[in-house]
Image: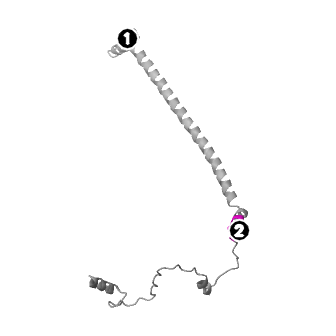
């Protein structure tokens, strides 16, 4: 026998209370594998339950979407909308009713009472410092007021 096999044989032959330590380690490893398989199965069962719950929610949402689409189709029926509009006093607009450019002022909405905005000049006028609406005149009036 070689010098290496003797210590190795002694190591594998070492016993704890009549049981070789290699067998004890083997039993512990098998127990650890059994426990890890149990934990993995429990996690897989939990995930399967979550998947089944999500599939059930998807089916419920699909039914809800179909019901909502049916409701929208019912609410958008032209006959229903026509009855509601006639009940509100609305009538269809004549398709031949058109206004020309010269008729636009006549059909423009009536402005409300209140301050009207000043029309903006189309052409740029030279700025006169003494003009009543200029910035320089406003600054001079503010200085004079102080």
Q: Quadrant of the N terminus?
A: top left
Q: Nearer the viewer, mark 2 or mark 1?
A: 2
As drawn, the label of residue 95 is none
Magenta stretch: includes residue 9: no
Q: Is residue 95 left or right of residue 131?
A: right
Q: Position of residue 94 (x, y in %)?
A: 70, 76
Toward the right, the furthest residue is: 79
Would you place residue 18 above or below residue 78 in this image?
A: above
| Displayed quadrant of residue 53 | top right
The magenta-colored residue range is: 82-90
Q: Viewer-proximal residue, 36 or 139?
A: 139
Q: Position of residue 83 (x, y in %)?
A: 72, 65
What residue does disc 2 label?
86
Callout 1: 10 Å neighbours few (<14), some, many (20+)?
some
Q: Residue at x 35, y 86 (%)?
A: 134
Callout 2: 10 Å neighbours few (<14), some, many (20+)?
few
Q: Quadrant of the C terminus?
A: bottom left
Q: Is residue 11 left or right of residue 73?
A: left
Q: Viewer-proximal residue, 136 or 7?
A: 136
| Displayed quadrant of residue 7 | top left
Inter-mark Cα distance, 2 to 1: 101 Å
Of callouts 2 and 1, the N-terminal one: 1
Q: Main secondary structure of the magenta part?
A: helix
Please tell me whether mark 2 sits on a helix, a strand or a loop: helix
Q: Viewer-proximal residue, 108 or 126?
A: 108
Q: Position of residue 143 (x, y in %)?
A: 27, 83
Q: Is residue 97 left or right of residue 33?
A: right
Q: Residue at x 49, y 28 (%)?
A: 39
Please tell me whether mark 1 sits on a helix, a strand or a loop: strand
What residue does disc 1 label?
15
Q: Residue at x 66, y 81 (%)?
A: 98
């Amino acid at each position: 026998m070689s010098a290496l096999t003797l210590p190795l044989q002694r190591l594998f032959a070492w016993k704890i209370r009549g049981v070789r330590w290699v067998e004890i380690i083997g039993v512990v490893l098998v127990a650890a594998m059994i426990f890890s398989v149990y934990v993995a199965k429990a996690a897989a069962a939990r995930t399967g339950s979550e998947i089944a719950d999500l599939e059930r929610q998807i089916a419920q949402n699909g039914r809800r979407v179909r019901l909502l689409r049916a409701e929208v189709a019912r609410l958008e029926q032209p006959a229903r909308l026509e009855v509601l509009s006639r009940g509100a006093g609305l009538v269809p607009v004549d398709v031949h009713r058109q206004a020309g450019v010269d008729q636009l002022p006549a059909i423009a909405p009536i402005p409300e009472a209140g301050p009207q905005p000043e029309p903006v000049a189309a052409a740029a006028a030279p700025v006169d410092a003494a003009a009543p609406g200029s910035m320089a005149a406003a600054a001079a009036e503010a200085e004079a007021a102080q």
